[in-house]
Amino acid sequence: MAALGWLTPRRRSATARSVLAGEASAEAARKSTQEVLEREPEFPVPGDERAAAFFDLDNTVMQGAALFHFGRGLYKRKFFETRELARFAWQQAWFRLAGVEDPEHMQEARDSALSIVQGHRVSELQSIGEEIYDEYMAERIWPGTRALAQAHLDAGQRVWLVTAAPVEIAQVIARRLGLTGALGTVAESVDGVYTGKLVGEPLHGPAKAEAVRALALAEELDLGRCAAYSDSHNDIPMLSLVGHPYAINPDSKLRKHARRMDWRLRDYRTGRKAAKVGIPAAAGVGAVAGGTAAAIALHRKRR
């Protein structure tokens, strides 16, 4: 009995200490959560009409390159020959697999795309773009990025795509996603017919930043309250313009820069390799590389 009496107070004391420890832990957690909320206010801020969001397209909103998917749709409609498809597809594969956008390859891809649409009516390409979106693009929209864009829309903010893809393609995608609009590369047209030339240069790298700056000025936006999203280090100028930059499915250079600058990162790809080297996962790479291989094989068979 003596031994039992000796144990009983210890048990009661241990229970009391456990309760005290639990209460202290809960209070610390509550304070920690409150501090985080105070450091990171609600974002996007509902009703902030001077804030907006700018989203890169390729591999940020959509898996793979929009221009390549558009090219597949045009090839299906016999806009160009198999040989041109093989060259065009290889250029797109290089962009995505090499992890860099070489100026010489970009020039070749731009010239290929312009030669394809030269002589066609703008209205024709816009109509076809709607069909191609349903055929090749709709299923390649990243749900995670789509949710981010919707959060801005739900907060009453405007959301634009900003891409080097032709503005006609970008506008179709923006409209289908319910976004405000799109900034894209503008191809010259006369009397509604493409001439095969660009107005200025592709909307790429620093040009994107200038487009966002100009739009913000025209729309009376405060860039410090705006957000921008991209997967590519080429878009660091655009990301650096805003107060809320996000690296989405980032390539290796952007990932390093984002960590150094303490930017937010989101990665919606599957597969460890994609996360490491910053290339599209199976759906993105497969669409490009698979399309390239198929085109080249078909071309060789017909020779």
Image (tube, rainbow, N blue to C red):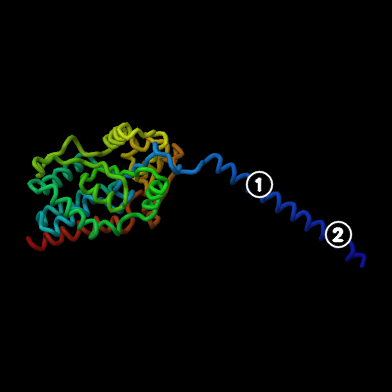
Query: Pointer 2: what residue?
Result: 9
Mark 1, secondary structure of its residue: helix
Q: Amino acid at mark 2?
A: Pro
Decide which of 10, 299 is in the foreground and name it.
Answer: 10
Query: x and y percent of residue 301 in the render?
Result: 10, 63
Relative to 277, 103 lies left or right: left
- Within 10 Å of disc 1 (Cα), the crowding (few <14, some 14-19, many 20+) is few
| Snapshot quadrant of residue 288 | bottom left
The label on residue 283 is none
Residue at (31% x, 39% y) in the render: 234
Residue at (66% x, 46% y) in the render: 28
Q: Which quarter shows the C terminus? A: bottom left
Residue at (27% x, 44% y) in the render: 182
Decide which of 181, 169 is in the foreground and name it.
Answer: 181
Decide which of 76, 212 is in the foreground and name it.
Answer: 212
Q: Which quarter shows the N terminus? A: bottom right
Query: Pointer 1: what residue?
Result: 28
